[in-house]
Image (cartoon, grey):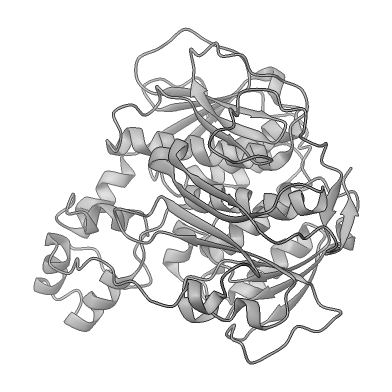
Amino acid sequence: MTTQISPNSLHRLVKHVIDSGTAASVDEAEAIFKCYRLAVEIDPAATSDPVQQAILLTIITLGRRVFLGGVTVTGPLRTPLKLSLPLGNTLATAVQALGGIIGEEVTGMPTIVIGGGPRKRCEGFCIRTVATGWRGGIVPISSDLPVDGGYAMPLSGMLAAGLAVNEAFLFVSGGMPAAGRRTVGLSLWRPEREIDWLQPDESEPILTYLPSHLWLIGLGHLGQAYLWGLGLLPYRDPAGVNLVLQDIDIITESTESTSILTDSTMIGKKKTRAMAAWAEQRGFATSLQERTFAADFKRQTHEPAVALCGLDNGAGRRALDQVGFDFIVEAGLGSGHRDFRTMRLHILPGRRAATDIWKHTRKGEKIEDRPAYAKLLADGVLDRCGMTLLAGKAVGAPFVGSVAASLALSEVLRLLHGGVVHQLIDIDLLSLSQRLVSRHPKDFANLNPGFVMAV
């Protein structure tokens, strides 16, 4: 029996195998993803470390949206939760709240190990996450590459988690033969491709200052990843954080597939209300803007001067530098089955006006002739208008947003710690080592966007 489908119900990563022609029907596509399972193991020595906990929980909230057969977690999980997230008192309750399955030792699944050292190489897929300083990434489980331990800041863990889930998905989907056998990572302090992320970097500061006033534009895939990253940061007093949350959309069934703070109980609610509830549970103060973002208003002086943009439309992006923000981090993600792992970050205002950067809207690949779409039409599940709407929806993967958000938030943190601000960061997760990073020509040294202290 053919699955009943609508443009707002189809899982955005399942759409990848439909648009690529890998699956001949929606039912076949969903069956493929329901066979994907992931095992996550946390080393006993890592369970009490807040950054290692951040890696674990980020992998679960990303992984269960990709590996629809389930994410099984092993390790000593009765450890107290060290992160100030609204997920209970122990790692076990947090794992279950995020949709993870607590199990015994598992075999035969792709495995991500958190913490610990090199192990004997095994058959199949097994990698280890690395987070140290401002650097995060993954190495094969047998890798004995020297990695300095000690202090790590939480976004390096978020970065490592996103890269780990991407690598595991590459393995199960056959997207890269070398998946699991390569070293992948970068530095959030110095993301240039010539920087060896595995080497100690004395220029990295201890995380001391955290943003206190932010305007989040768009609360879907990227916006929720921004909120998750903010939730991981070690605020001494989260009540000093004021967030403006702006969106007009309602949560639909498909939202959960890419947006990591959404669950099925939120369907039908406004994104602003659901995300404000989460942020307030974390201890942040919020105010809401339930209007389309455009150039027809001006930011008031008492409102946040720093904006994080997660819009997926050119019209809104073209207005970003026209409403009075002093510092804007904009992230855009690829939306097709070939480029959904790509991301491009801009800092505004910059050398080019927003209207010049997003002057043209690029047309996507025509995919309506793929077998799965033809079947939906032939079976009467969708009419031609509905099929066109469904075909036009973006392919998306939550791990891409996680990596992009860790980079975007790091731009704000670097600003607060006197580091370099970047005009452009251009990345494809298929070839992270080929990223393009360019320094911003403007000096933001005199900008004080508002901050509070870290623990």
* Quadrant where the image shows the N terminus: bottom left
* Quadrant where the image shows the C terminus: top right
**Residue 305 location in percent, x, y?**
78, 72
Q: Looking at the image, which residue is at 44% across and 22% down? A: 126
**Residue 203 location in percent, x, y?**
77, 33
Q: Is residue 358 left or right of residue 87?
A: left
Q: Is residue 7 left or right of residue 190?
A: left
**Residue 67 location in percent, x, y?**
40, 42
Q: Is residue 8 above or below residue 400?
A: below
Q: Looking at the image, which residue is at 43% across and 10% down? A: 121
Q: Is residue 342 above or below residue 332?
A: above
Residue at the outermost left position: 378
Q: Is residue 166 above or below residue 301?
A: above
**Residue 391 location in percent, x, y?**
26, 70
| Nearer-the-camera pick, 234 or 430 | 430
Residue 220 visible in the picture: yes
Q: Looking at the image, which residue is at 14% across and 62% down? A: 370
**How many numbered dots are placed on residues in this image?**
0
